[in-house]
Image (cartoon, coloured by chain):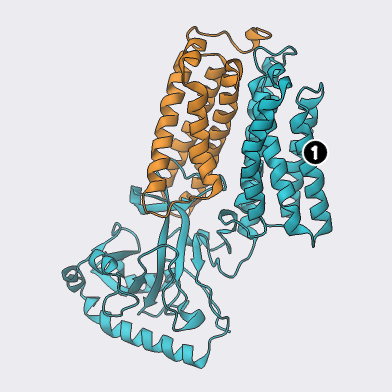
Chain colours: A cyan, B orange
Amino acid sequence: MAERVFSSTYLSYGLLRYEPDHGLMFDISPDHAIGLYAGLIALPIALIVMRLMPARRAVPGTVRAAAILMAMAGAVHLGLVSTHLEEPITAALFVGNGIAYLVLATMFTWRWWRLASSVLIIATLLGYLAFIALGLDTPDQVAVATKLLELTALGLVLVPVRDELRSRDRAWYWAALATGLPLLTIFSGATIWGVDLSTADARHVHVGAVLQATNDVVTPEQEAAAAQLYAETKAAITPYEDWHAAWKAGYRPGGPDNLPSTHWMNDAYAKAGYVMDPRHPQGLVYANTRRGPVLLGAMFQMQHIGQFGPDPGGPLTAWHQHENICVTPLGLEFSLMTPFAICPIGAIDVSVAPMLHVWIVDNPTGPFAVDIDPRAVAAVRARA
Amino acid sequence: MSDGARPEAAFVLLLMQSTFWFAAGVSAFPFVLAGEPWMVGLGLASCVLAGLGSLLAAGLICRSRRARRWTLVLEWVCLGGSALLLLLPIGANRGPVSLMVNIALPLALVALLRGKKMRAAFSSHGASPTASAGG
């Protein structure tokens, strides 16, 4: 079986390689999708039911909003029961939790409603975090969205309102709320992120990159096809060892030359829609050396996100797509989107159409590796 | 939602949003160690914005006109920026969490704080939260 090893032209990829998986928490797990639909359907129903309840006039709007969010969370949990019947304990927990949420959502005039709701929400939240920390489930978009609903509901349950009969409007209470809610949110996000980072998935080879699904073991035919692709590509891009020729052909550097290497892109080839054509690779990768750019390899890229290209070499030539990375124009640096789907200020969340590299220099991680080994780049730069 | 509780609901949402910005700021710092110096600035800017968001949230509780105005400006900017990113073909995440945090949350804040009644509620500087107990 061919082993996939990856490295990168970017410095920070060294850090990213420690993450074997990235993407699950940004996906919707098929068995969780029904929970999302149930939650969305519950919203208008909860609004109508709330409107029909005369008791709603006796409570502040924050309480009503919290009750609606709790009804949605309850519907999500009940919706998940049908796809978890093979896990009786999980299914029972979903049933109990869903019913508790729905019951409390209708009992908002009860004297102990705030306390009961807070306890239920916090217990549900911590229970879920323990559940995923123990490896009993993996976080996905439905789970994160539900946790955000619950955290918002918790805030609305606890926040004091001016015209309440029993006021909790005290300085210590505000301080506890203003620190406790963010801390619980950060703790939840960190746990979800930590679990996501430590969950292995064959298709998520390193952070921010998703590999094309292929067979595991290379066949002799695939090996031959990969060798042919390599030979044809190497022959076709040899003229671009002189970067002036690349410039003349329309390739332009896509970043600063103070990095170890730079991708040069050809917009015309990208727009023309060539598919893995060795004579028209959409990108070239150059090492930045004292003597100028030195060709490291070529990069084929598809036109559309999610559209993986042909894969003649099976696992040897699997395409990869970068997803949910936060890119900043400042020095072309990037980081990762948080579980809350937010990038640092000044960076934007992007995904990049699938690509396949062909490295024509000796790359320890292979001629079609997602990235080139920094040692290979360093060796090229040292020789120049 | 009753007009009296709208600033408190807005406080909760703005506090949550500030927490998300803080998390994004902190998440940038490991990349500085990995050789991306500009991420320091972005991380710090995000943390500063989170701090400002928290101050605005506190201002809403105090019924500060300035806090309401700046919150509305901030949320419109967030909404416009997020909508632009979602509409551009750059592969921005369009999952439920992204839509909740980047679209629904700012939209809810704008809906909570805009309107004549809210302008009137914030027309005179309120006292501190504790001084308004039972008021």
Is residue A135 visible from the viewing direction of this image? no
Seen in the picture, residue B22 relative to A369 is either above or below; the reply is: above
| Chain identity of mark 1 | A
Residue at the image position 56 percent from the left and 20 percent from the top: B58
A334 relative to A284 in the view: left or right: right
- Measuring from the top left, give residue A352's x and y in whole percent: 40, 60
* Residue in front for this viewpoint, A174 or A213: A213
Q: Position of residue A175 (x, y in %)?
A: 66, 22
The residue indicated by pointer 1 is A100
Q: Amino acid at mark 1?
A: Ala
Q: Looking at the picture, how far across and down is residue B25, in whole percent?
A: 50, 41
Residue B124 shows up from this direction: yes
- Identified at 64% across, 28% down, the residue is A65
Residue B34 location (% of width, % of height): 47, 55
- Residue drawn at 50 percent across, 49 percent down: A337
Image quarter (top left, top right, bottom left or bottom right) of the C terminus of chain A: bottom left
Residue in the image at 41% along x and 88% along y: A227
Nearer the observer, A238 or A120: A120
Q: Circle 1 — which element?
A: helix
Total labels: the figure holds: 1
Q: Quadrant for the N terminus of chain A, please.
A: bottom right
Q: Residues within 10 Å of mark 1 (few under 14, many from 20)?
A: some
As drawn, A316 above or below A143? below
Is B110 rendered above or below residue A188?
Answer: above
Up the image or down, A196 lies above or below A98; here it is below
